[in-house]
Image (cartoon, helix red, strand yellow):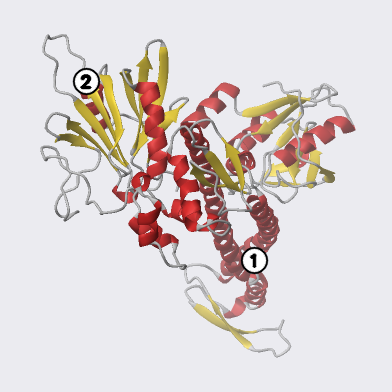
């Protein structure tokens, strides 16, 4: 019911008090369907919002306009015809949800130009904002153009004469006496639909409210209770909430929601502002949660594809022993193989069954060279097997991280919590941020994050894989300490040790380990294993992508991710 006929009646009363005789000083567009009007009344200034949104169509006073978008043609058209004009009349057309604001445009000429009128129709998906010439009702422009292919009842197009939407014959709620009421609603099984269909100005919510109040009073008395609020001086604007969810902005207390809470406001505009602020907050939370879920689903699919690829690689790597056996058999039978052969059949001495193997050969190589080729394949496959096992372990850790992230997203119930998770997702690479802003920030701050430990040691943290490589190749010295989250993607961390001390103080080690944990994909975990070793034991893997290394002589610390307060730059 948030913007029904009664709500518009009260808003119209408030607009008359605030805006009659006022001057339109500025018009800006909040979004494709919503416009903000800055209206001055002497030294006072107020803002009016008018929206033709398919779900949230409305008009009311607001404290300040929402952030605007680029002005559309229609916004410019309104400004051209209405800016600096004086508001001469504000009215609700009958009991319809239609607001008409008449404006006398400003002119330096003796003869005033024709008056204009904004007509706002609040009718769900058919909502519209229309500018007409008030002298002959000719449509000058409208937000939504409606031609005969879209509506068989009326056209809403520039140049056409404005006409009201199709009208229904209903009873006037303020001129309805008890006798007439009883004639129409004489049976005991009156429903809210019958009230809604026969009495003008009643929304489904108001009709349901009459039925709800009739449980404790006669139907006529219940009707009188509701109709009393049609007087703006007797209205009691309420924001009705179910737990933390906004149910409706109501001009009256609603007995039909006995378990709901309510908050009373001085004006209908204040109530509508609070309601739509709550709706906007709710929609932002739903949208943010949807974004985070999509990011997790995308990351899960990525990990599943990686996992499948790794198991395929693992299957190939497990054939390494076959390569060794084939090489050994060739060496044992060099005298049987001549250059130019494409294959050879040899007895497999390594098998209990001593079956014959058909071994493919490179005809351009000697038997010895063919054997060496198989040994190279064996060495490469065996080394790959170890690397694949490590990657599978890392992948399993990443999947556990994703599972934890999913739980956090589902349990997050505030926008602040969701925004915090959004930031984490950006840092973990699940979501992209503005690349230009990110590049500018890194340009300003340098390729590394830099900290100073409590013991005065300088700690460098890589920002990405290229930064990690640079840290190892150009910054780290053999006696510097290197740290990295164990089997988890993350930044490389270096503790500078220019004095070549034989050990690093434990407080500094712990701080550096916390940084390694914080700038890893286990950022949100309670305790993270972090390996540390001297930089001389860390070697970049040949032929691998940036950031991948091999290290030995490591030890492990278990720490909670954190960033020290002392940061150098």
- Frontmost of labels 1 and 2 is 2
Q: Position of residue 197 (x, y in %)?
A: 34, 58
Rendered position, 35 above or below 525: above
Say above or below: 390 vs 37.
below
Tell me if residue 503 can be seen: no
Q: Residue at x 72, y 39 (%)?
A: 518
Could you say where residue 405 lies in the image, as x and y percent from the top left? 66, 51
Kind of element beneath mark 2: strand
Q: Which mark is residue 441?
A: none
Front-lying residue, 563 or 252: 252
Q: Quadrant of residue 79?
A: top left
Circles 1 and 2: CB atoms closer than 8 Å:
no
The x, y position of residue 248, in whole percent, is 51, 46
The location of residue 28, given as percent across then percent down, is 34, 26
Q: Which residue is mark 1?
A: 378
Residue that badge 2 annotates = 104
Q: Is residue 482 above or below residue 459?
A: below
Label 1 crowd (10 A; few <14 / some 14-19 / many >=20): many
Position above or below: 138 against 175? above
The residue positioned farthest toward the front in the image shown: 179
Left or right: 383 in relation to 213: right
């Amino acid at each position: 019911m948030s913007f029904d006929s009664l709500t518009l009646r009260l808003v119209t009363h408030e607009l008359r008090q605030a805006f009659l005789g006022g001057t339109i000083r500025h018009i800006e567009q909040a979004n494709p369907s919503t416009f903000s009007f800055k209206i001055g009344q002497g030294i006072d200034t107020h803002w009016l919002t008018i929206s033709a949104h398919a779900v949230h169509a409305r008009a009311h006073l607001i404290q300040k306009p929402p952030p605007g978008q680029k002005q559309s043609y229609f916004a410019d058209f309104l400004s051209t015809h209405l800016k600096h004009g004086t508001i001469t009349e504000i009215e609700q057309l009958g009991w319809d949800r239609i607001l008409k604001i008449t404006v006398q445009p400003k002119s330096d000429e003796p003869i005033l130009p024709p008056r204009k009128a904004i007509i706002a129709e609040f009718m769900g998906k058919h909502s519209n904002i229309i500018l007409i010439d008030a002298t002959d009702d000719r449509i000058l422009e409208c937000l939504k153009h409606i031609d005969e292919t879209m509506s068989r009842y009326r056209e809403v197009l520039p140049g056409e004469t404005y006409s009201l939407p199709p009208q229904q014959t209903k009873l006037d709620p303020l001129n309805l006496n008890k006798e007439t009421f009883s004639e129409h609603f004489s049976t005991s099984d009156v429903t809210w639909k019958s009230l809604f269909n026969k009495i003008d100005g009643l929304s489904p919510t108001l009709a349901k409210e009459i039925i709800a109040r009739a449980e404790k009073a006669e139907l006529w008395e219940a009707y009188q209770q509701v109709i009393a609020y049609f007087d703006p001086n007797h209205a009691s604007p309420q924001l009705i909430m179910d737990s933390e969810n906004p149910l409706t902005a109501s001009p009256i207390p609603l007995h039909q929601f006995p378990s709901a809470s309510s908050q009373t406001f001085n004006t209908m505009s204040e109530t509508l502002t609070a309601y739509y602020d709550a709706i906007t907050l709710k929609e932002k939370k739903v949208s943010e949660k949807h974004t985070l879920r999509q990011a997790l689903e995308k990351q899960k699919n990525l990990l599943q594809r990686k996992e499948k690829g790794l198991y395929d690689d693992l299957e190939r790597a497990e054939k390494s022993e076959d390569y060794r056996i084939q090489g050994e058999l060739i060496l044992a039978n060099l005298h049987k193989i001549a250059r130019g052969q494409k294959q050879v059949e040899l007895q497999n001495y390594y098998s209990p069954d001593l079956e014959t193997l058909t071994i493919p050969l490179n005809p351009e190589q000697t038997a010895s060279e063919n054997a060496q080729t198989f040994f190279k394949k064996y060495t490469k496959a065996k080394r790959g097997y170890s690397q694949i096992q490590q990657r599978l372990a890392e992948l399993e850790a990443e999947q556990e991280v994703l599972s934890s992230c999913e739980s956090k997203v589902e349990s997050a119930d505030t926008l602040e919590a969701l925004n915090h998770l959004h930031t984490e997702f950006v840092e973990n690479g699940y979501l992209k941020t503005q690349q230009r802003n990110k590049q500018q920030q890194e340009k300003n701050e340098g390729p590394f994050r830099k900290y100073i430990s409590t013991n005065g040691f300088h700690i460098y943290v890589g920002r990405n894989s290229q930064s990690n490589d640079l840290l190892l190749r150009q910054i780290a010295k053999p006696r510097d300490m290197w740290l990295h989250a164990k089997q988890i993607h993350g930044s490389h961390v270096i503790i500078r040790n220019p004095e070549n001390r034989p050990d690093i103080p434990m407080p500094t080690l712990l701080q550096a380990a916390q940084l390694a944990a914080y700038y890893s994909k286990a950022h949100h975990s309670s305790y993270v294993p972090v390996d540390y070793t001297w930089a001389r034991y860390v070697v970049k893997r040949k032929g691998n992508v940036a950031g991948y290394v091999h290290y030995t002589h490591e030890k492990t610390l278990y720490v909670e991710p954190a960033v020290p307060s002392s940061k150098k730059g």
